[in-house]
């Protein structure tokens, strides 16, 4: 197995990953809670600080550039204030943004109001993109994917991946590694991908409950075979992760000593996996590295990322 030190920062810097999916703007309003509203039994939050972060597929791409690889982001957004904030934030990170715009679309915004160190409410602003914009995204995809070593589809079920079946087929025919962070109960749209990375709850939606590891192995391999996947990587939180491929299974135990926050850990795992494959590692070599990255990120507060030196030691 490749040791982490066998991949140099220079090798990783040449790796190019195209991230396709639903990008979001995460807004946080922080404030003091001193009283209950006279209008309803709810706390009154006196907002003292606001913050904006990139979320969903944009956060996946951010994880890739933080590691030291190159990332492009293909997404569909609105022609609104939130979309311009999102694009500016994305551009600052070094990600190359390719945003399709639809004046009828609301850029997805998740607004969290936080008081007394806890989330009091989350407000979501979103709708579904028009077919015409999604079609133009497909044309942009055709131009972009040949320039990249791996393609990562980050599916958040917001409608931005209506043409994923065709995109996967094009990328695989060209010999690209194709990774999918899946959503929903219909995985047939991910057929022929290199690897999909469901968590336990997501996989259970598709194959049903399992009663033992042996039962899980049979069901996971049956799903992998039916979808013609090279592999299925099950992320299992405190139990680590298990790769199911044509060699059988590879289980890697969790490494986190202390878990502060699991927010975005799945993004970090698939981003690291994509970067490693783009840099030339095999899946079985890349999985322990992705597992280590996930273990590091859950030891941090909030949506976090992992740098090259954290993962591999000083270059």
Image: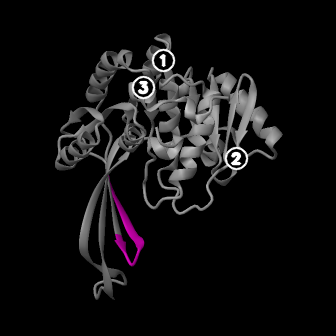
Q: Residue at x 30, y 36 (%)?
A: 95
Mark with earlier residue (1, 3)? 3
Q: Quadrant of residue 137?
A: top left
Task: Give the extent of the magenta segment.
Answer: 114-125
- What residue occupies the far front of the structure in this picture? 315
Mark with earlier residue (2, 3)? 3
Residue 267 in sight in this render: no
Q: Which residue, given by chain and number where applicable, does mark 3 sit on?
A: 15
Disc 1 and disc 2 in contact, CB within 8 angstroms: no
Image: 309 above or below 20: below
Q: CA distance from mark 1 to mark 3?
A: 12 Å
Q: Which residue, given by chain and number where applicable, does mark 2 sit on?
A: 253
Way the structure is coloured: one colour
Q: Which residue, given by chain and number where applicable, does mark 1 sit on?
A: 176
Q: Whole-percent x and y of residue 201? A: 62, 48
Q: Whole-percent x and y of residue 183? A: 51, 40
Q: Residue at x 76, y 39 (%)?
A: 216
- Report whether 258 appears left or right of 272: right
Image: 236 above or below 278: below
Along the line of sight, the residue nearer the viewer: 155 or 97:
97
What is the secondary structure assignment of the residue under circle 1? loop
């Amino acid at each position: 197995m490749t040791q982490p030190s066998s991949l140099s920062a220079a090798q990783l810097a040449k790796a190019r990953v195209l991230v396709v999916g639903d990008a979001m703007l995460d807004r946080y309003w922080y404030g003091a809670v001193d009283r209950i509203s006279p209008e309803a039994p709810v706390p009154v939050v006196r907002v003292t600080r606001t913050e904006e972060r990139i979320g969903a597929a944009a956060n996946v791409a951010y994880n890739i550039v933080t590691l030291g690889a190159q990332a492009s982001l293909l997404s569909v957004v609105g022609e609104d204030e939130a979309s311009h904030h999102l694009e500016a934030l994305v551009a600052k990170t070094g990600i190359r943004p390719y945003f399709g715009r639809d004046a009828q679309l609301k850029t997805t915004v998740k607004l969290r109001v936080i008081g007394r160190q806890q989330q009091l409410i989350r407000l979501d602003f979103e709708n579904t993109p028009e077919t015409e914009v999604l079609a133009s995204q497909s044309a942009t995809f055709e131009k972009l994917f040949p320039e990249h070593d791996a393609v990562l589809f980050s599916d958040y079920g917001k409608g931005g991946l209506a043409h994923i079946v065709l995109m996967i087929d094009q990328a695989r025919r060209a010999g690209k590694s194709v990774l999918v962070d899946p959503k929903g109960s219909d995985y047939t749209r991910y057929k022929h991908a290199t690897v999909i990375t469901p968590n336990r709850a997501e996989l259970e939606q598709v194959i049903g409950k399992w009663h033992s590891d042996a039962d899980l192995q049979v069901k996971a391999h049956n799903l992998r075979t039916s979808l013609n996947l090279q592999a299925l990587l099950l992320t299992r939180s405190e139990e680590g992760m298990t790769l199911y491929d044509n060699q059988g299974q590879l289980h890697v135990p969790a490494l986190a000593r202390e878990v502060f926050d699991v927010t975005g850990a799945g993004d970090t795992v698939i981003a690291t996996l994509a970067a490693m494959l783009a840099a030339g590692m095999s899946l079985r070599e890349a999985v322990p590295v992705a597992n280590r990255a996930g273990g590091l990120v859950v030891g941090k507060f909030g949506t976090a990322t992992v740098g090259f030196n954290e993962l591999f030691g000083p270059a």
